[in-house]
Image (cartoon, rainbow, N blue to C red):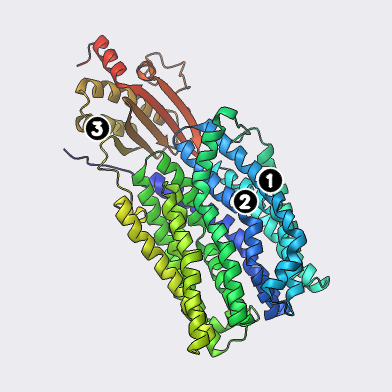
Amino acid sequence: MGYEYLRNEAIIRSKTREFFGVGTVVTASAYLVSVVDFMLIGALLGADAVAAAGLCDSFVDVAELFGFVLSSGGPVAAGILLGKRRLRQANGVFTLSLLLTLAGGLLCWCLLPFCGFFSGILSNNGAIANDVARYAFFILLSSPFVGINLVLSSFAILDDCSKLAMGSVVAANGVNIVLDIVFMKYLRMGVAGAAAASLLGNAAGILVVLPYLLSKKRTFHFVLRADDLRETGRELASSCSSFATDKASRIFSGLTVNLLLMYFVGNIGVALYAVYSQLRFILRILAGGALQTISTLGSMLYGERDFYGLRKMLSLLSKYTYALVAALMAGLFCFSAPFLRSYGIDAEPDTVLSLRIMLLSLPLLWLNDLLARLYPSVQRQRLSVLLLTLQNVVLKILLLLLCVAAISRLHWRSVPTVAVWCLLVELLSPAVTLLREKRTCGNVALLGLEDQADRSCHSFSITGKAENVADIHREIDLFCQQNGIPRNKGVLLAIAFEEAALNIINHNEHVSMIDICLLLEEGNLIVRIRDDGAPFDPLAFVDDEDILQMNNISLLERLTDQKTYTRIMNMNNTVLSIKLEAAQNDGANDGTC
């Protein structure tokens, strides 16, 4: 007999929208400043200044390396550990992330004396060499501030303190944009003023999020036991591997690509490629909340083995974000010339054509971003590393070399050729990766992980009404039949779980639905009861006025070997572990049949 597999989608929909909204605000604020920076540089200083800032993309990646990697991979690892109810290791991930971010940021200061040397190489000792050196100096100087701000904001979102995270990012970018104008226009600092403004903006963001770090009520604390260090480090390294590959490959390819463009295409090629990078930022401003949601909500759902919820979350995020991608493409296709002029680039026929070719790559570019963020959250890090290596290094450099050869020997028009190169990179990278995933894993994670074939894991939902509690009995009976569990055990367990669900419903007016997951693991039955109501611990509550003990869970207390309650992502999570043999003995003693 197959499962009817009844699930209420309301929790997944509401949480996806909630985290997408928060993530969009945070991500939009984070990337908006980069887009505005380049627009202000182009408007106030011209296309050569845009090229100088574009040449420093690799220095920006170096400055953000530790902060980006640990603020992306750290919450993923912590979310999976929370889903598995391993809070101590999650605390260790938080602690280690902060320490490594600070150490990495200080390490970047060792590069400060060499800014002039690198700028000479990147600019071919041209007129913009001094601008490149000064911009790189301030960018590297800001590294510790950028990293700490990113890590604290990311963990604050995971810990349901999204307002502080949003406030931090908004404050950092607000200060940055105001100081951009002050430094570049009034203090005549040139392009270096934009980098100096970024440094002070991130310092302001840390001050805003500091109350989270000082709060005693936060979920994550500074805990890093020596006996957990190896396991915690392994979990963190596993989750961070793809993000580290992303940044490291961008640093390497950024240097190589900018050198090739500067030598074979000129300043206009570097400036146009910088505009293409801004298209990625604009896309993340509009749809980047999906990436944040996958890292936080998605990693926790995977840790709980809630594959149904994971599929629904991805379906919703894909609908939201690809509608935004289509709107962005249509808007920029119609207003290509004004968009180029906003960066100080003349709207010549070749540059307009090139921008429109680049717009065709946006759906593929977004697919790459979704896959790169999803794979670490479902512990397919190798695929993420493969995708990012292809996208950022292998295909990018190989195809660019072919394009450079075509420009040099076949005399192709240089600027449109650069645009075609961008499109081919974004097309071939996911194609190769998805084929590899299908071959090695048997399915494509973005289309949905399979869980119904796994009879040891079953999830279902009931609405928050007392009359629906009887559905628990039916679902548990089906689960026991599928897994060869004697019926007397199922009856006893069903009664116990009905008690827990009634306890939640009777003492919480705001519960709209309850999700229940049954999982067989090493001879134990693991049960997760999740609801979207106000904070309430059904294991600790005792109704003194309930003489008949209709609202208490005495049977569940007798059956349960381990029980925990946590409040994660604004949801109540009660997890129970029951030894099936013990449950059978209790049933025999009670005369249950």
Q: Which residue is mark 3?
A: 479
User: Which residue reaches farthest top?
Assistant: 589
The amino acid at mark 3 is Phe
The residue at 60%/73% (across/down) is: 258
Residue type at mark 1 is Ala
Q: From the image, which quarter does the C terminus lie in?
A: top left
Measured in 3D between alpha carbons, the distance from the residue under mark 1 to the one under mark 2, in whole angstroms, is 9 Å
- Residue at left 33%, top 46%? 308
Q: Name the residue that disc number 2 marks.
A: 66
N-terminal label among 3 and 1: 1
Q: Quadrant of the N terminus?
A: top left
Question: Residue 278: which disc?
Answer: none
What's the mark number on residue 103? 1
Given residues 515 and 122, the one toward you in this image is 122
Measure the C-alpha gap from mark 2 to mark 3.
45 Å
User: Is label 1 in a helix, a strand or a loop?
Assistant: helix
Q: Position of residue 116 (x, y in %)?
A: 76, 67
Q: Is residue 341 visible?
A: no
What is the crowding at mark 1: few (fewer than 14 residues within 10 Å), some, or many (at least 20)? Answer: few
**Which residue: 62% across, 60% down?**
61
Separation of marks 3 and 1 at Cα, in angstroms = 50 Å
> Do labels 3 and 1 touch, CB within 8 Å?
no
In the displayed structure image, the side of residue 342 where residue 232 appears, left or right: left
* Dot 1 and dot 2 residues touching (CB under 8 Å): yes
Q: Is residue 213 left or right of residue 523?
A: right
Secondary structure at badge 2 equals: helix
Q: Could you say which is closer to the camera, residue 391 or residue 488?
A: 391
